[in-house]
Image (tube, rainbow, N blue to C red):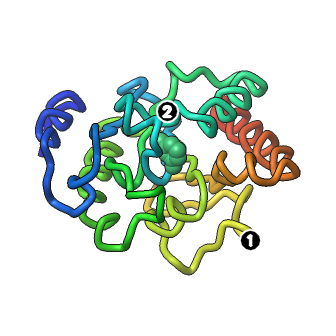
Amino acid sequence: MANSLDELKKEIDGCKKCRLCEERKNIVFGVGNPNADLMFIGEGPGADEDEQGKPFVGKAGQLMDKAFDGVGIKREDVYIANIVKCRPPNNRDPQDDEASTCMDYLKEQINLVKPKIIVLLGRIALNNILGKEYGITKDRGRWIEKEGMLYMPVWHPAALLRDESKKIDFWKDLKTVKQKLQTI
Ligand code: URA
């Protein structure tokens, strides 16, 4: 068990625990405030993230930043990570064994950051963190409390790029999160 995010990051350096190591350029560990009350969990790095080693820096990330600005969430205040830390080839979904192998790292990150709220960005984050009985279409925008943690599933920002009508939900859900944060 690492004592800090920096220590964990060093431990993960060069990880070869699953096949995703074969084609990655960079491990995308996570960024943000190490003591954030609010944590965001995405799916896995895309091409831009793999290139830069940082989560949500491509088109989906830029859209997420716009929503953050709109509702008054500052990127430097939150912590952002992914279910898998290495880019799945051709942006395919992470496979179950890849996600579960990487989950030990994510759990350590959550334990170190100790957020009050975790926003689950999209289906992959929702199903891997809370289980496959949840569905993003039916459960987005709804608070889910589990083992003392508050979760808010929302559309993945990439889904907003494909379907603009989802933007309204995304903005609304982030507003709900921002309001809740001020009360806990
Ligand atoms: N999509 C994700 O799920 N995570 C990223 O870091 C970038 C795009």
The amino acid beneath tag 1 is Lys
Q: Is residue 60 left or right of residue 100?
A: right
**Could you tell me how many numbered marks the image carries?**
2
Q: Residue at x 38, y 28 (%)?
A: 52
The answer to which of 112 and 12 lies nearer the viewer is: 12
The amino acid beneath tag 2 is Asp
Q: Can you give x and y, in whole percent of width and height, for residue 179 in the image?
A: 73, 34
Q: Can you give x and y, in whole percent of width and height, for residue 47 in the image?
A: 45, 42
- Dot 2 or dot 1: first in sequence order is 2
Residue beneath label 1, please?
A: 138
Q: CA distance from mark 2 to mark 1?
A: 26 Å
Q: For residue 112, which quarter of the picture?
A: top left
Q: Is residue 130 at least partly visible in the picture? A: yes
Q: Which mark is residue 37?
A: 2
Q: Residue at x 41, y 64 (%)?
A: 94
Q: Can you give x and y, in whole percent of width and height, for residue 176 in the image?
A: 75, 42
Q: Residue at x 76, y 36 (%)?
A: 175
The answer to which of 22 and 28 lies nearer the viewer is: 22
Kind of element beneath mark 1: helix
Q: Residues within 10 Å of mark 2 (few under 14, many from 20)?
A: some
Q: Is residue 34 above or below residue 143?
A: above
Mark 1 residue CB less than 8 A from any atom of ligand 1:
no
Q: Is residue 116 at least partly visible in the picture? A: no
Mark 2 vs mark 1, foreground winner is 1
The answer to which of 146 and 69 lies nearer the viewer is: 69
Q: For residue 60, which quarter of the picture?
A: top right
Labelled pair 2, 1 in contact (Cβ < 8 Å): no
Q: Residues within 10 Å of mark 1 (few under 14, many from 20)?
A: few
Q: Residue at x 32, y 49 (%)?
A: 86
Q: Can you give x and y, in whole percent of width and height, for residue 66 in the image?
A: 72, 27
Q: Is residue 32 above or below residue 154?
A: above
Q: Which mark is residue 5?
A: none
